[in-house]
Image (cartoon, helix red, strand yellow):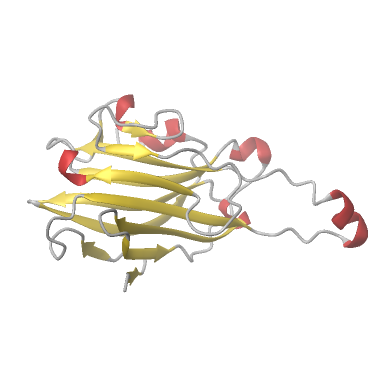
Amino acid sequence: MAISLQKGQRIDLTKGNAGLSKIMVGLGWDPVQSKGGGILGNLFGSGAPEIDCDASVLMLEDDKFKDNKSLIYFGNLNSKDGSIKHTGDNLTGEGEGDDEQILVDLDKVPASVNKLVFVVNIYDAVKRKQDFGMIKNAFIRVVDNANRKELLKFNLTDNYAGKTTLVVSEIYRQENEWKFAAIGNGTNDRGLKEIVQHYV
């Protein structure tokens, strides 16, 4: 049974899971269905553009972002050390389950990296006039890749209207163990360049 976390909670990932190394971090969300007007709405659709959410990982050293190769996202799917692999971009959020998945091999994360920050932002949010108030059922979950067992899940239930980026969670090193922190903070960052500035 997966552990369900609330915002602000922290949990040991590796301490109670001997040998845990390869994990899958799944992020999901659903677009809020627009209230299309009657026959015309059904015939022509809502006319609203699809909301393209992008999941990314920042690899921090001493809580600082050191170089652009430490950002794993749709434009850089693999970390240079092979510890993190983004499986690709989902453009709409349609469908059940994870919308984007990130594979992490904790044993391969360089010793200099103390924290992995998972963020989701809306691509071209300002231009498209979109924000996370248009998204529902957002979540992050961690799965043990060896046995496909879901270890934890964090449902983001805050009101994120007006926010264009979510800092979803952190996986961080404490001594020889890895821990997970449920963050769930919304920001008004317009894209990855602005997000990264918080950690420089």
Q: Residue at horizontal 48%, vertical 40%?
A: 189
Q: Quadrant of the N terminus?
A: bottom left
Q: How many marks?
A: 0
Across and down, in percent, residue 41 comes to: 86, 56
Q: Where is residue 67? Give x, y as percent.
A: 29, 25
Q: In this rendering, would 58 be left or right of 107?
A: right
Is 124 situated left or right of 112 in this image? right
Residue at position x 15%, y 43% in the image: 107
Q: Of all residues shown, which one is farthest toward the bottom?
A: 1
Q: Where is residue 165 in the image (x, y as percent from the top left)?
A: 48, 46
Compared across the picture, whether 27 is left or right of 45 comes to: left
Closer to the camera, 175 or 89? Answer: 89
**Quadrant the C terminus occupies:** top left
In-front residue for pair 18/55: 18
Q: Quadrant of residue 127?
A: top right
Specify the farthest residue to the front. Answer: 147
Residue 123 pos. (x, y %): 56, 38
Q: Residue at x 40, y 28 (%)?
A: 76
**Residue at horizontal 27%, vertical 59%?**
147
Q: In this view, does 14 lie to the left or right of 151?
A: left
Residue lying at the far right of the rendered structure: 39
